[in-house]
Amino acid sequence: AQSVTQLDSHVSVSEGTPVLLRCNYSSSYSPSLFWYVQHPNKGLQLLLKYTSAATLVKGINGFEAEFKKSETSFHLTKPSAHMSDAAEYFCVVSAGRNYGQNFVFGPGTRLSVLP
Amino acid sequence: GAVVSQHPSRVICKSGTSVKIECRSLDFQATTMFWYRQFPKKSLMLMATSNEGSKATYEQGVEKDKFLINHASLTLSTLTVTSAHPEDSSFYICSAVLAGGPFEQFFGPGTRLTVL
């Protein structure tokens, strides 16, 4: 079984400052990890994914995340926040032989960007 | 590529009626699709796994007779909320996995259901 913890339910940053959204996971198998973004009343958009290749993963819109097995973490970062980054962010872990049914969502982190 | 659509995007219905939501993979075949429910300001909750040509697999606590799922083709899965009640009001999101491709779920834009 796997689980995901997003340590902050809400993060607020000023425009132009760095963003850090934290994610920790637990998994019995080697995991695949994903970050999705959801804008209000919209579906989910994939930001980036880790699937056992390079541990530092670059995604869209300047986001990146680093897989740290020793810390069981997959934190999402961005050097400089933009107003359009304000949204809900979900960390997702998937592992085991039946990937589809083991796609576990974290509780989400709401990112606010202040002018 | 890998676009998933949902129809309708928003629906309002009266209590006791049934509502059908469609999920389509527009440019790829999907042997497996998933249906999620999202409550306001909450994360996604997996309701069921829909497999083309076979019965859906429901998560614990999800009523199969209430939420009917049909996956009639490799590009279409439908979720029918039967005898809807106000507590069924929610945001329903589907996703699809590319048949034979690398594992990744492609999500639809969601359907907002409001039951009066």
Image (cartoon, coloured by chain):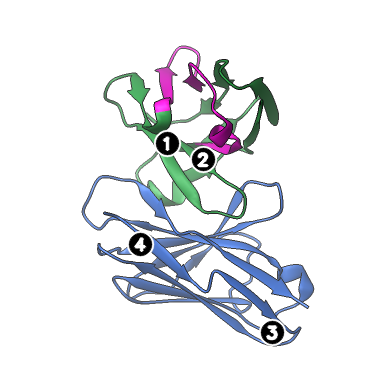
Chain colours: A green, B blue
The amino acid type found where label 2 is placed reads Val
B48, above or below B17, in the image? above
Whole-number angstrom distance, CA of label 4 to CA of label 3: 26 Å
In the image, what residue occupies the spot 70% across and 31% down? A9
A8, above or below B57, in the image? above
Whole-number angstrom distance, CA of label 1 to CA of label 3: 37 Å
Disc 1 vs disc 2: Cβ atoms closer than 8 Å?
yes
Mark 1 on the same chain as mark 3: no
Kindly indicate the quadrant of the structure image that contains residue A97. Answer: top left
User: What span is colored magenta in the figure?
Assistant: A62-91
Residue B68: give x, y in percent of width and height.
Answer: 54, 78
The amino acid type found where label 4 is placed reads Thr
**In which chain is the residue bearing label 2?**
A
Tag shown at residue A37 = 2
Crowd rating for badge 1 (residues with CA inside 10 Å; few <14, some 14–19, many 20+): many
Kindly indicate the quadrant of the structure image that contains residue B92. Answer: bottom right
Disc 1 vs disc 4: Cβ atoms closer than 8 Å?
no
Residue A10: give x, y in percent of width and height.
Answer: 70, 30
Whole-number angstrom distance, CA of label 2 to CA of label 4: 22 Å
Whole-number angstrom distance, CA of label 1 to CA of label 4: 22 Å
Whole-number angstrom distance, CA of label 1 to CA of label 2: 7 Å
